[in-house]
Amino acid sequence: MKWGAFFFVLAVTIHSIYGQSRLIDSLTQQLSKVEGKEKADLLNCLTFEFISKDNVKAKQLNDQTIALCKELNYERGEGVAYTYKGIFEYLAGEFSDGRTSLREGLRLATKVKDVQNQGYTLIQLGNSYLNQALIDSSLLFYNKAHFILKDSASPRTLSKLYKNLAALYGVKSDYEQQKKYLIRCLKIRELLHEDDLIANALIGLITVYLREDDFNEAAILFERVEKIIKSRPGDLRNLNDWRHQKALLLLKEKKFEEATPLLDSASAYYFRNALQSFVTLQTDLGKVFYERGEYEIAMKSLYEALRVAELKNYIVEIIDIQLQLGWVNFQLGELKQSRIFADQALSLAQKNSLTKLIADALTLKGVTFTQMKDYTNAKTILDQVLAIRMSLKDNSKISEILMNIGFVEVNRENYAEGIALFNRSLVLAEQSKYDFAKAWCLLGLSIANLRDHNYTEAAKFIDHAESFAKESNTNEILIHVYEEHRDLFAAKNNYKEAYRYSMLAYKLKDSLHRSDLSRRFINLQKIDEIERRDRNIKVLTKDKELAENKINLQQYKLNQQYFFIAATSIGIGLLAALVIVYARYYFRVKRLSIMINGKNISIQRQADKLKEINQKLVEQNKLIETQKEQLLVSNENLENVVDHRTAELSRQNLQLEQFAFMTSHNLRAPVARLLGLTQLFNAKDLADPLNQQLIEMIKTTSKDFDATMRDLSSILEIKRGVNGNFAQVKFEDCLLKARVTLNEFAQIKYSLTTQFDEPTIYGIEPYLISVFYNLLSNSAKFKKDNVILVIHISTRKVNNQVILEYKDNGIGFNQNEAGENLFKPYKRFHMHREGKGLGLYMIKLQVESMGGTVTIQSEEDKGFLCVMSFDASDQKSGDISLEIKRAAVAN
């Protein structure tokens, strides 16, 4: 079952390439046999085939069609051509040009009384306005189309109108109307017995059922669509829409490995042919990673979707992405940024009268105010959301908002009112089968009763929440349940049970982290495997085409045998020409094969690098396990040792989690770009100018990948103490060596003074040079404009500590806003200046590796002060205490 979806997609893809190619080849062959109006109609058919596959080819054919129709004065064909021109223009985001072309097509269709094209063009005009969330304008054109088509003999076009009306009511959050029009569309198409249209309508209904969490109905429709796709291998749009929705169902069922290849294939197709669907898919991916707690990867997918949506002005998608980014920032604790995204989405939703999205934006804003402890504003906003949800009659959302208001009341210590709200929410959640709200309501009831000192009720709801969380496999909620158990037993002074539940929560968090990390590496391997199989499919397809060409050539020779006998010389000439063409195809395929093998070798090397990093992570995990065992032994002896070791283990585990997440995130981005660029490579036309640009982009991405690997390797070397040769080191010598390697100071005016009252420390010379290098580099990057940079470095001895102070008069930064991100890797506080965000992280890592500590003091426009402290008692050679500190930092 695990590989079933993949092999189905593989089989359909092979047939798709073959079937689609045969249709287009057939139309192209007929083109040379017809003239006049018949040729114009055939060109329109070819244009339509290329609209969703190759916009460049579609435009070439369309320009040729319009020119031919004008020459023939064939206004019916010209009207169709202008309609097709408008379609691929607005699909490419050129809405103004697209509508101009569509109106010209409508004018010509009206003039020649082409009712079918009139209705079809009005539908496309409605679509162009719907893509920009201009609901009223869209509905106006749909109503005009319905007036024309309702009594016409064109049920096919009428079904398309119903499909688009369903999409419109979906944007308006009128889901009953949406389902009604989708069912009407499906009934018409079933009467027409046109499988591609039936599949399209079924996929629309699947989307509705998935939104309603009606997985049984969705599964039945998936089976119908799958049968149709198998019988129509050339229907790439329905195939990729099926992949998209099937992947979402698999993700809801937590079958991530089966969903990944489907999403990747659909994403590649959408990016080439349907950008709006690409945006929707990337947004869905962002939501999935958000629900899994992989916030950095979620933000990457969401920002990629937002970039395309803003470029193409997809209003609804922009609002949805802004809301999702707001929730990601909310979970990361960036409440200020979360509120900014909520306000942006709310403004855009109100401007376009999108009621559901207004409620979604207000919900985010209200929950953010709750987290900021502004309960008055939170209650006011959430009450507004409740009124909207009640008007929309969406029980699952009403349950969710009642739950959020319940948490506000509990935080305001209105426990009775909070409990009442949780009970109302719980009833609606059970009616609508909304497990997310049900779990949180049970947890909220336990929290409210615990804070109200009603321990019996609190214990009952905690046990109920624990049972439900285990049944539904919601580990994140189970962690909160264990923490509530801990607080309950602590309140009852049962510290032994409180400690047991504390350890259960900790172990569950640790297991979730490990499983997420393992799944990320498995996903990378699966994606690489799928890409290799896709390339093999393309090679096999090309070989098949060559074999078919050879068979056609032999058949042609047999059919023309009599002609070759009568005109031997002409036959030999034709044969020679065909041999040359065949040879060109053969050598071209051979060159492509060599290039593909080279890319396979490159990808294998990258996989080896990932394997090496994974081995290092395994070694660190083993070391952490050893430390855990030592910590448990110490726990049996002294209670104060328990507190100390627990804090130490948490810090080390957090560092490992940050490094593992950083490794996964920063390596995935360049690898994904490399894979994406190889997919865009035009293997059919090596002279394509875009290929040279892709090669340069591959080089740039490879350099970025190498730089990231070197950064991560440097961090690992410091953590493992690879360069840790301790000796007596002079501050002045290390400063001089750092200045020699620094290029930034050659381009600025500066003043550097030193006062080394304590000239040496017992440390690691490369680390101290690196510390000076990073400090000087930061001073150069963040100096004030038009002000001479002033730097003062001094050392002194205070209470058996060697103090190293570094001070400059740069632009500084807001230390309060930096907060806990101060020493985290890849965290930057001045986005307008160049940098990676590794400087302070490397300084802290290297100073702690030498047994020291670092503190930072800075304010905006008031300069920067870094104070590093080293134990003077460690200055003796071979001091065992320093070796112990080095081992602790390395671990």
Image: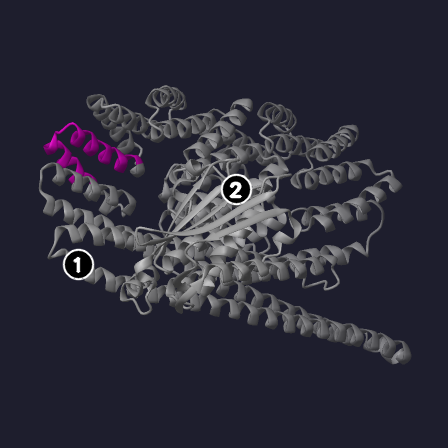
Task: From this view, report whether residue 154 is shown above or below residue 596.
Answer: above
Mark 2 sits on what residue? 280
Q: Disc 2 on helix, strand or loop?
A: helix
Mark 1 sits on what residue? 632
Residue 160 pos. (x, y %)? 59, 36
Q: Residue at 26% across / 38% down in the picture?
A: 439
Q: Residue at 64% across / 74% down in the picture?
A: 594
> Going by the image, does 573 lie left or right of 541?
right
Task: Considering the whole magenta stretch, tell me its main secondary structure.
Answer: helix
Looking at the picture, tell me which residue is in the foreground, 731 or 212: 731
Q: Amino acid at mark 1?
A: Leu
Residue 606 pos. (x, y %)? 51, 67
Looking at the picture, tell me which residue is in the foreground, 462 or 769: 769
Q: Is residue 687 visible?
A: yes
Looking at the picture, tell me which residue is in the foreground, 427 or 696: 696
> Going by the image, does 274 lie left or right of 518?
right
Residue 857 covered by magenta stretch: no
Q: Quadrant of the C terminus?
A: bottom left
Residue 572 pos. (x, y %)? 86, 79
Occupied quadrant, residue 874: bottom left
Please tell me how many numbered marks the rendered image carries.
Answer: 2
Magenta-highlighted residues: 437-465
Q: Quadrant of the N terminus?
A: bottom left
* Residues packed near mark 1 inside 10 Å, few (<14), some (14 to 19) or many (20 plus): some
> Going by the image, does 784 lie left or right of 579?
left
Separation of residues labelled 2 and 1 (CA atoms)? 49 Å
Q: Disc 1 on helix, strand or loop?
A: helix
Q: Amino acid at mark 2?
A: Thr
